[in-house]
């Protein structure tokens, strides 16, 4: 199964932290929805899922029902603490998420969020492709995406595509050889 990690970075390379003062760009969110529809699924962490289903944005029920933005999409939430969330599949590990989606017949898994989730897939060498949306903002102390949090090592990537999404957001797509 091909796995694609989708993330937004700041212009100075941090993992972008959205907040009311720094909301995600509409173009990046629209791209995520398009990528999720193309894959037929996405994997997120519990905190990211809760933020996505914040009632000020969209209710959890609307998100997974037949009329929500992710209707018909398999949503997999990675959580070690929560056993059940109505309308989604909850798993405890990246391998379990990939196995579940593979058993459902998906050829691609979209890893959509949470720095911890992204880093766990990267550290375990489970990512074939990364999509970075570079947001037009500089951020102070931030989080990083890491292939190994304990060692200083490199992993070569190959540029597949580069395109503007609008509102000064640039999307970079890289292949990672596993």
Image (cartoon, rainbow, N blue to C red):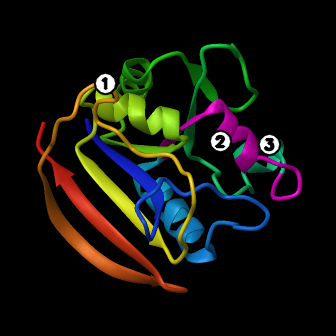
Q: Quadrant of the C terminus?
A: top left
Along the viewing direction, whichever of 94 and 9 lies nearer the viewer: 9
Looking at marks 2 and 1 on the same chain, the residue that comes earlier in the sequence is marked by 2
User: How crowded is the residue under tag 2: few (<14 C-alpha within 10 Å), some, or many (20+)?
Assistant: some
The answer to whether any part of residue 107 appears in the image is: yes
Between the residue at mark 3 and the residue at mark 2, the CA separation in whole angstroms equals 12 Å
Q: Where is residue 64 in the image (x, y as percent from the top left)?
A: 71, 44
Secondary structure state at the residue bearing disc 1: loop
- Write the start and end of the magenta stretch as one range: 41-58
Q: In the figure, is residue 55 to the left or right of 60? A: right
Q: Do the residues bearing badges 2 and 1 touch, measured as CB atoms within 8 Å?
A: no
| Front residue of this view, candidates 107 and 126 | 126
Task: Identify the residue position indicated by label 3 in the image.
Answer: 60
What residue sits right under mark 1 in the picture?
150
Describe residue 80's horizontal placement relative to residue 133 as left or right: right
At a point 25% along the width and 35% down the height, the residue shown is 1
Question: Separation of disc 2 and disc 1 at Cα?
Answer: 25 Å
The circle drawn on residue 48 is 2
């Amino acid at each position: 199964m091909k796995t694609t990690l989708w993330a937004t970075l700041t212009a100075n390379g941090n993992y972008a932290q959205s907040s009311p003062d720094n909301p995600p760009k509409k173009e990046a969110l629209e791209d995520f929805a398009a990528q999720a529809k193309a894959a037929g699924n996405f994997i997120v962490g519990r905190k990211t899922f809760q933020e996505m289903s914040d009632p000020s944005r969209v209710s959890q029920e609307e998100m997974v029902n037949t009329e929500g933005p992710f209707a018909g999409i398999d949503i997999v939430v990675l959580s070690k603490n929560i056993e059940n969330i109505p309308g989604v599949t909850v798993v405890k590990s990246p391998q379990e998420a990939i196995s579940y989606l593979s058993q459902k017949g998906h050829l691609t898994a979209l890893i959509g969020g949470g720095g911890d989730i992204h880093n766990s897939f990267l550290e375990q060498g489970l990512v074939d492709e990364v999509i970075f949306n570079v947001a037009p903002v500089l951020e102070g102390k931030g989080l990083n995406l890491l292939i190994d949090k304990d060692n200083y090592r490199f992993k070569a990537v190959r540029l597949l595509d580069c395109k503007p999404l609008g509102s000064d957001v640039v999307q970079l797509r890289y292949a990672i050889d596993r």
